[in-house]
Each structure stands twice: as structure tokens, then as C-alpha cells.
Amino acid sequence: MVACGTSYNSAIACRQILEELSELPVVLELASDFLDRQTPIFRDDVCIFVSQSGETADTLMALRYCKPRGALLIGVTNTVGSSICRESHCGIHINAGPEIGVASTKVCIT
């Protein structure tokens, strides 16, 4: 899982659930760290990108880093038609409505 900011905090909460359901280890990275480390990605990997807007620059760059490496790319966003939605292989729309406040809250609602 790759995310930034509040989306990263939400991903922390989801990590254990995904590990229990899948019985597989789940690695969670800040998008900026993921890119700096040039994390190895393989064809059998599933990469989940979490972004309320679907346009978070570091998260989008991480997705674009993974795409030519053949992994399955899943976008989790609140914005249908966002770059992360369009560029991932499949997506989950959290349908939390528009973000009105300065601080991100919608990513934690669902």
C-alpha cells in the first residue's frame, strides 16, 4: 500500500485487516519514501494506491513507477475519474462526498 498524509494514516488502520483477510504480508509505504528507495516491484505484486483526491503527486508518481514493472495496480480514491482511477487497473471509489474542510477528513469516513 502506498499513500501520503491522512490517506497514509487510513492505510495504517487497514493494513492489519488486509493481512488477516488475505493471509499475506502487507507492506505500507509513504509515497515519497517508496520512490526514494526505488522499492523493487515484481509481476506478482499487488500495489494499492490510496488518495482522497486521486491526484496526490507522490502517490501518482509511485503508481507510474510500478506500472511498467507489471504489478496489479489498485486505486482507492474519493474522486471518480481522477488520475489514480484512470491509470490503475481497477479501483475502489469510497464515495464519501466532497472534501470541504482544509484538513482531510473524507479519507477516514469509510
Image: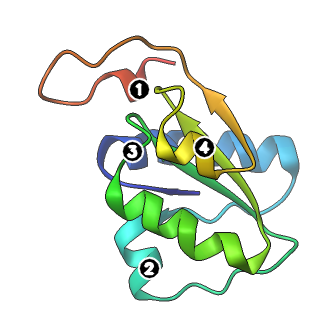
Q: Residues within 10 Å of mark 1 (few under 14, many from 20)?
A: some
Dot 3 or dot 4: first in sequence order is 3
Dot 3 or dot 2: first in sequence order is 3
Q: Which residue is mark 4?
A: 86
Dot 2 or dot 4: first in sequence order is 2
Is residue 50 toward the left or the right of residue 69 in the image?
left
- Residue 76 horizontal/vertical position (percent): 58, 38
Dot 1 or dot 2: first in sequence order is 2
Secondary structure category for the residue under label 1:
helix
- In the rendering, which numbered label is found on residue 9? 3
**Distance Cα–Cα, label 2 vs label 4:** 20 Å
Dot 3 or dot 1: first in sequence order is 3
Secondary structure category for the residue under label 2:
helix
Mark toward the viewer: 4 or 1: 4
Is residue 9 toward the left or the right of residue 86 in the image?
left
Amino acid found under the numbered disc labelled 4: Arg
Q: Which residue is mark 2?
A: 35
Could you tell me if the residues under marks 3 and 4 are in contact, i.e. CB atoms within 8 Å? no
Amino acid found under the numbered disc labelled 3: Asn
At 39% across and 44% down in the image, what residue appears? 9
